[in-house]
Amino acid sequence: MTPIEPNRSRTWHRSVLGAAVLGMGVLLTGTSAGAGSVDKTPFGNTQDGKAVDLYTLTNDRGASVKFIAYGGIITAINVPDRWGKLDNVVLGFKELADYESMNPYFGALIGRYGNRIGGAKFTLDGTQYQLAANNGPNSLHGGTKGFDKVVWAVEPLSSVSGAAARLNYTSKDGEEGYPGTLTVQVVYSLTNDNELRIDYEATTDKPTVVNLTSHSYFNLAGDGTGGIDDHILTINADRYTPVDATLIPTGQLASVTATPFDFRQGAPIGARIRSNDPQMAYGRGYDHNFVLNRSGGGLSLAARVYEPRSGRIMEISTTEPGVQFYSGNFLDSTLVGAAGQQYRQTDGFCLETQHFPDSPNKPSFPTTVLKPGETLKSTTIHKFSTDAS
């Protein structure tokens, strides 16, 4: 079992991309041999009149990732099943208006602080900072207007290994109550090995706290095909962080042994989701952070998901110390997805790589403090493949 190092330094790796930035035409094609393409089309205007474009990254195997500048939201990931049929494996909407008005963070970039901060406040260098309480008494996913609700600047990149684009956003000092002007870059890369790579980078001009992640809801059988109970999930974690009734970690690092949280050998998501374990009652299912087994700051396997009907496999590697497993517990049939279906409880799952929830108030957790002169760098890779046909 790997110990957690309190306040360890934040060291991560970033992807290596070609330096050339392509022009912003309708079709922006990679210039290197074997490179994919980046396509840009209009996706509508926000309620305050900002134009939003849809970008499509396509690799040389025909797989694609679609995202919009609003929230950096990934609207589709099209990857093959065991017979080679492409399907979209993430949940989402058809219209920008739905993403603005009712989105439960489908596909969004999350910041400044992914997950929850207890009591919607924290103290840094002797100063207490008050945040928006948008999830009961707590602050969730950056507050009332987090990074999921801003329009990012997007620039396609050249890449020798597929297709890529960089998203840029500057969060002003005091935005949503957080100190410091935070400059953020996120690179989405779709490699020719069917890997979606997400590289995060951030700097600040004042000490602040940062926890960046991506919030796609996955269904490897395909969007609109029903529930995810039969997906076989493996999580590389001996421990998890139990929560209180408001889903804030207690500070304990508890063993997963003999609990519904033991996914070390792989288990169907639905096998124990209705357990009478009090932790499951708090989240109405899984909504918990897992302490990944890892050493050092490089990429390490976090989770593997296998969908038996399609044969699709998703393996997630990350430089982060934790992953939040959320089983779509609050989908309640009131949302209609892009494929025309009502989204019900457990129609999708999230595996959000991250530092731990409420770390600013838990000194024993890995630190999320970022200081001037430091650069936050973090990488997560989703690798898609299939079993034998």
Image (cartoon, rainbow, N blue to C red):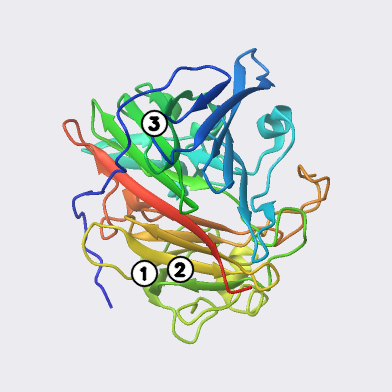
Asked if labels 1 and 2 touch by Cβ distance under 8 angstroms, the answer is yes
Disc 3 marks which amino acid?
Ser
Outermost residue, front side: 33
Instruction: Judge by depth and name the residue closer to the eye, 307 or 272.
Output: 307
Disc number for residue 158 = 3
Determine the CA span between mark 3 and mark 1: 45 Å
* Circle 3: element type: loop
Q: Residue furthest left?
A: 373
Dot 2 alpha-carbon crowd within 10 angstroms: few under 14, some 14 to 19, many 20 or more: many
Q: Which of the pair 25/124 is nearer the observer?
A: 25
Label 2 sits on residue:
242
**Mark toward the start of the polypeptide (2 vs 1):** 2
Residue at x 63%, y 57% (from the top left corner): 80
Marks 2 and 1, how far apart at CA: 7 Å
Q: Residues within 10 Å of mark 3 (few under 14, many from 20)?
A: many
Q: Is residue 230 above or below residue 374?
A: below
Tell me residue 201's x, y (percent): 32, 37
Q: Which residue is mark 1?
A: 252
Q: Amino acid at mark 1?
A: Gln
